[in-house]
Amino acid sequence: MKELDKLDKDILFNLIKDAKIPHRELAKKLKVHTNTLMQRIKKMEKGGVIKKYMAAADYKKLGYDLHVVVMVRVNKGRVGDLPQLKELWEIPEVQAVYACTGDYDVIVVAYVKDRDGLSALLRRIEDNKWVYRTNTHLVLYAYKTPDEYNPLETEKKKR
């Protein structure tokens, strides 16, 4: 896909903020025809710029009271070459798994319901034969979450 122009970025900026905004309303806001808007959205979907549409849930209201970050050091392997850790991202409570630099090799972000859930999660992570050591952190407050991040915010402010 070719580079995004200003209209594509404006469309994407608004969809990241609110994916449920009606096409007619967004077209009016951006001063373009609805068909133009829909064609641009389809192009970005086909080009992989728009990967999916999703709802941002309040995990606490779903009963997941503990938000944890588990730093993982592995026994063998290179940071980007860890398919042996696939079972980590298959754990239902795990929200994200990142290969990283620094003292640890992998960051696991998860939500669990309580201390028993945390204990079970840590056991599953530590039972992986490639995991050498973990260091767990409880998130006390989330001031900004991934669903609030809009990479086009910076560009919008520059204009």
Image: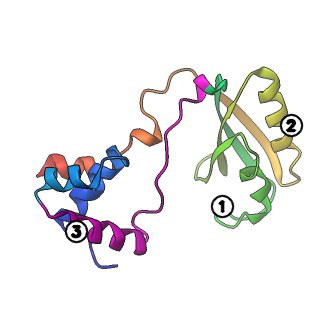
Q: CA distance from mark 1 to mark 2?
A: 22 Å
- Name the residue beneath numbered marker 3: 35
- Percent x, y of residue 117: 79, 28
Sooner in the amino-acid sequence: mark 3 or mark 1: 3
Q: Upstream in the sequence, badge 1 or badge 2?
A: 1
Relative height, residue 146 to residue 139 (above, below) = below
Residue 25 located within the stretch drawn in magenta:
no
Work out whether 62 lies above or below 9. Answer: above
Q: How far apart in space, not on screen, are marks 3 and 1 (Cα)?
A: 45 Å
Counting residues from the start of the chain, the first of labels 3 and 2 encountered is: 3
Between 116 and 58, the one lying in front of the other is 58
Q: Quadrant of the N terminus?
A: bottom left
> Which residue is depicted at the point 66% across and 50% down?
106
Q: Is residue 139 above or below residue 100?
A: above
Which of the two residues, 104 or 118, is positioned nearer the viewer here?
A: 118
**Badge 1: how crowded within 10 Å, few (<14), some, or many (20+)?**
some
Dot 2 crowding, Cα within 10 Å, few <14, some 14–19, many 20+: few
Q: Is residue 149 left or right of residue 78?
A: left
| Coordinates of residue 39 in the picture (x, y in percent) | 28, 72
Locate residue 120, reporting x and y percent.
84, 33
Q: Residue furthest bottom?
A: 2
Q: Which residue is mark 2?
A: 123
The magenta span reads 32-61
